[in-house]
Image (spheres, helix red, strand yellow):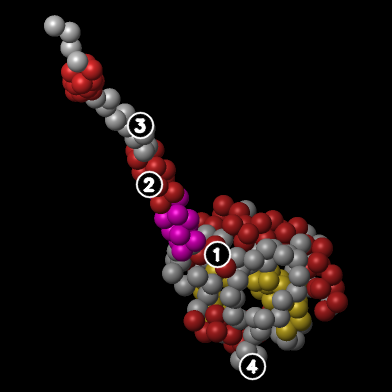
Amino acid sequence: MGKSYSDKVKSRSNKHKASNYDRPKRKNRSVEKPPFPFAPVIVIGIILTLIAVSVVMYANRPDSNDNIIINDNDNNNDTPTGSGTGSIILDTTDGGKIFLDQYKGKVIVLDLFATWCGPCKTQMEELDILKTRFSFGEMVILSVGVDLSESMGLITEFKRDEGATWTFARSSPEFNSAFPSSSIPTLYILDKDGNMGKTHVGVTGASILESDIRSLL
């Protein structure tokens, strides 16, 4: 017996449902993002941190050379206090004692230095040249180690290493107060009466010093 039209519709509907039911469901495909490269970022962060720490440590290092100034210009910021400086007694590397008043009648070049100061070594070369341009009766050079933490032995060794042939002495609190040196090398040039003539802060060439001395003779 043939199926009625309504039976055929039901049969098709059932097949459609079965077809939809049996059809495998499509899985949601999620796109996987590549993992964030945390390791390289951490390494870079550590490197940058170390660099920053190094910069800070370098900037705040206890390096005495921070105050060294190298120039050929006059600087009158460091000025001797004046009276009584000629009688200040200093111990010398040869075991003697000196005071500035004993050099009256001569121009005095006071070279304030420290053995750890690189530019001070350069200044020694200029002073060695300067010494050959004047007689002892005209001018004397006196290099004074102003770092009171340095022993006389260190100053003596420094003089020997530099081949200097003029007088070296170790400073004293009294001398440092009378002849301040916020930067080294500092050179004070005193006239034949012991009065202040010229002041230079930083490495100063022999020709400049020679000109100053001749103006005071």
Q: CA distance from mark 3 to mark 4?
A: 89 Å
Image point (64%, 66%), residue name: 69
The N terminus appears in which quarter of the rendering?
top left
Which residue matches tag 2? 46
Q: Is residue 117 above or below residue 37?
A: below
Q: CA distance from mark 1 to mark 2?
A: 29 Å
Q: CA distance from mark 1 to mark 3?
A: 59 Å
Please name the amino acid that badge 3 sits on: Val
Taking 76 as reference, is 169 left or right?
left
Residue 24 placement: quadrant: top left
Chain-order first, disc 4 or disc 2 = 2
- Which circle, 1 or 3, is nearer the viewer? 3
Q: Nearer the viewer, residue 179 or 97?
A: 179
**Is residue 51 covered in magenta?**
yes
Which residue matches tag 4? 83
Please name the amino acid that badge 2 sits on: Ile
Give the magenta part as a residue range. 50-61
The kind of secondary structure element at disc 1 is helix
Circles 4, 1 touching at the beta carbon (< 8 Å): no
The kind of secondary structure element at disc 3 is loop
Please name the amino acid that badge 1 sits on: Asp
Which residue matches tag 3? 31
- Which circle, 3 or 4, is nearer the viewer? 3
